[in-house]
Amino acid sequence: MNVLPDQSHPTNPVKAIRAYCLECCKESQQEVKLCPATECQLHPFRMGKNPYRKPRTLTEEQKQALTKGRDMFNIAKSSLIESENEFISHGSINSHLSTESDESIVNSGRYPVYDSFPEEGWD
């Protein structure tokens, strides 16, 4: 029996089975699909899907809640994009229309401004 291929990152078991089947079939996806080894316990999982997993069924209320959540997300995302665009456009307009010196824009009054460095007191 072959050993599972060395994987650099962890993966889920079904994807690991798919990797094993690809190695077994010399990396040919068509050969994995046509695999005649039906007695192999991994055979049902060879395509990278769990055939025994039940499809998710949602009630009408769950569907409405998901739709409402998606709509709320889209509204929030669009308003965030609009506010970022507004900030960018105002910032670029303000920078072009500004009459302040470059020093006052950079400093913004947070640090004292010296015309020259004091000769004494700097160690």
Image: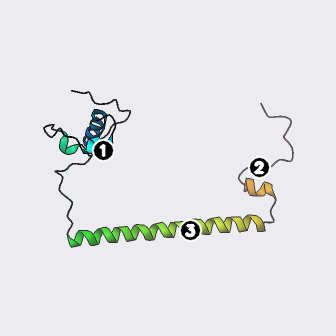
Mark 3 or mark 1, whichever is nearer to me:
1
Q: Position of residue 40 (x, y in %)?
A: 16, 37
Tell me which residue sits at (70%, 65%) in the image: 92
Measure the alpha-carbon separation of dots 3 and 1: 50 Å
Q: Residue at x 30, y 37 (%)?
A: 22
Mark 1 Cα shell of 10 Å, populated few (<14), some (14-19), many (≥20): few
Quadrant housing residue 102: bottom right
User: In the rendered structure, which disc, 2 or 3, sits on the residue that comes first in sequence?
Assistant: 3
User: As displayed, is residue 65 above or below residue 36?
Assistant: below
Q: Nearer the viewer, mark 1 or mark 2?
A: 1
- Image coloring type: rainbow
The residue singled out by tag 1 in the image is: 30
| Badge nearest the viewer, 2 or 3 | 3
Residue visible at 84% across and 34% down in the picture: 120
Say which residue label 2 marks.
112
Name the quadrant of the N terminus.
top left
Quadrant containing the C terminus in the rendered view: top right
User: Which of these two is toward me, 123 or 52?
Assistant: 52
Residue highlighted by disc 3: 83
